[in-house]
Image (spheres, rainbow, N blue to C red):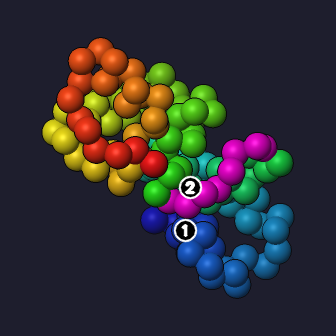
Amino acid sequence: MPADRHDLVRRAAGVDDAFPDESAVLAAWEKHREHLLAACPPGRRCWGWRIFDHTGSKLPWKGYDRERAINWRAGVLGAEEKTTLEAQWRRDFEAGRDLKWADVPRELVRQWRKAGGRNDQAVG
């Protein structure tokens, strides 16, 4: 991993001395953006995306545990990513997993239950 890409990850973890100034951080983000976003699991976004790509957006940060449902609702996921994530959530639903822990949107759970699904786990 190139040093500046690594430093972007470190900065996200709270290490603020990796770059001389914000313009250097932005330059590193622009250079490594595609690679870093491609490395994100379905429904998730890395630090740089929130700071640079969605500055001033109405997307709330309510923590890692709620990130996927928030991004899903906001419509920021690509079509393939959305399909992958919904399939993963559906498997969680059908397996009877804790849906709040899995960050499954309430509206999907309601839809699946209405269609005859069986998961009775509470959804946050």
Residue 54 horizontal/vertical position (percent): 74, 46
The residue located at (50%, 59%) in the rendering is 64
Taking the image as shown, residue 58 lies to the left or right of residue 75, namely right
Residue 46 disc label:
2
Residue 16 sits above or below residue 64 on the image: below
Q: Nearer the viewer, residue 15 or 44?
A: 44
Q: Residues within 10 Å of mark 2 (few under 14, many from 20)?
A: some
Q: Secondary structure at mark 1?
A: helix
For the image, the number of numbered tags is 2
Residues shaded magenta:
57-64
Taking the image as shown, residue 112 lies to the left or right of residue 59, namely left
Tag 1–tag 2 contact (CB < 8 Å): yes
Residue 87 horizontal/vertical position (percent): 30, 29
Sequence-earlier tag: 1 or 2: 1
Q: Nearer the viewer, residue 92 or 53?
A: 92
Q: Quadrant of the N terminus?
A: bottom left
Location of residue 13 (image quadrant)? bottom right
Residue 58 within the magenta-colored segment of the rendering = yes
Location of residue 113 (image quadrant)? top left
Q: Which residue is mark 1?
A: 9
The residue located at (46%, 37%) in the rendering is 105
Of badges 1 and 2, nearer the viewer stands 2
Residue 25 horizontal/vertical position (percent): 73, 65
Q: Secondary structure at mark 2?
A: loop
- Examine the rendering and report whether any part of residue 35 can be seen: no
The residue located at (82%, 74%) in the rendering is 21
